[in-house]
Image (cartoon, rainbow, N blue to C red):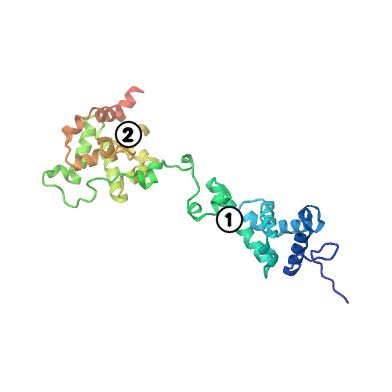
Amino acid sequence: MTTTTTTATDPAGEDYTSGEGLRALLNRLHDAGSGAWEHDPVAAELMSYAAEKYAPLARKHGLDPWEAVSAAFDVMRTRAAREADDPWGVVTHAVRITCIAEERGQGLLCSVHQARRPHVSCFHDPERLSERENTLSDYHPAFHVTDPHHHDNEPDADVGESASVTGAVEDAILLFMLLGWPEGTARPAIEHVCEALARIGSRTGTYEALRRDRHARALLDVPAASWTVLLRVLLGRATPGYGATGEGRGILLRLLIGEGLPVLLGDDGLVATISHTAPHTRRRGA
């Protein structure tokens, strides 16, 4: 019994699936002149075979298979492919590099030629600011504000009792009570924020964690608008440009660095913000 094996050959018997067969075909097309690739039927079959061969590689990099064929066509016409010990190996390597460059070029919004250069391809793909849930200032280190007293281990002697954590918390509670917040609301809410701050260790991280904590807000019985204001004035703004201001530092830090209640009560903007969002004031105006 005779077994026959089917190979990708043209009617003339050229087997371009093997290295030797591909070399012979490339040499013949090269010797035939400039119009051979356009009119030779075997060349068309070779391109169809290349499209099927490199389709998985193209899909891996998010490309159309014929984009990989275009890269294969470019390298097949070179002297390096015709004279290589493994022509298909040379073609495959070139197609892989081109697919990677095509993918990087699309991601970096630049040409493939630029994407091949290491000093360009080392960058990450551009991102729209709207693609992230948090604002740019929340995660980019260039916009982080360092508390000037963050690394102080010992309280300053001039600060006295008001510089202690307990004293700062009590002064913050008293400030809210003086500006119309009920003690039953202000005390548990502020103590909850301080406990979270001690656990998380970052004012920005604490703000981001608590502003989404609807369960805690419901247990504390604080309206959404009042809760947002309480977090912002206690912890301060992380927005660039506010770091050295009272609004950027927040009430807790201002108390810790020696600003007492009289100073805070003299801040008209702070007083208006806290008093206008007092929970009982909102209910009375509803």
What x and y, as percent, mark residue 228? 35, 35
Query: Which residue is at the far right?
Result: 1
Would you identify the image quadrant in which residue 232 lies? top left
Residue highlighted by disc 1: 100
What x and y, as percent, mark residue 207? 34, 42
- Of the numbered discs 1 and 2, the one sitting upstream in the chain is 1
**Residue at (85, 73) in percent of width and height:** 3
**Residue at (78, 63) in percent of width and height:** 28
As measured in the structure, the alpha-carbon distance from the residue carrying label 1 to the one carrying label 2 is 49 Å
**Residue at (35, 43) in percent of width and height:** 143
Label 2 crowd bin: few (<14), some (14–19), many (20+), radius 10 Å:
some
Could one spot residue 144 in this view of the protein?
A: yes
- Tell me the SS state at disc 1: helix
Query: Which residue is at the far bottom?
Result: 1
Q: In the rendered structure, find residue 229 and report the number of the disc placed on it.
A: 2
What x and y, as percent, mark residue 188? 27, 40
Would you identify the image quadrant in which residue 281 lies? top left
- Tell me the SS state at disc 2: helix
What x and y, as percent, mark residue 193? 29, 43
Amino acid type for the residue under numbered disc 1: Ile
Q: Is residue 270 above or below residue 94?
A: above
Would you identify the image quadrant in which residue 265 lies? top left
Amino acid type for the residue under numbered disc 2: Val
Could one spot residue 17 in this view of the protein?
A: no
Q: Nearer the viewer, residue 123 or 191?
A: 123
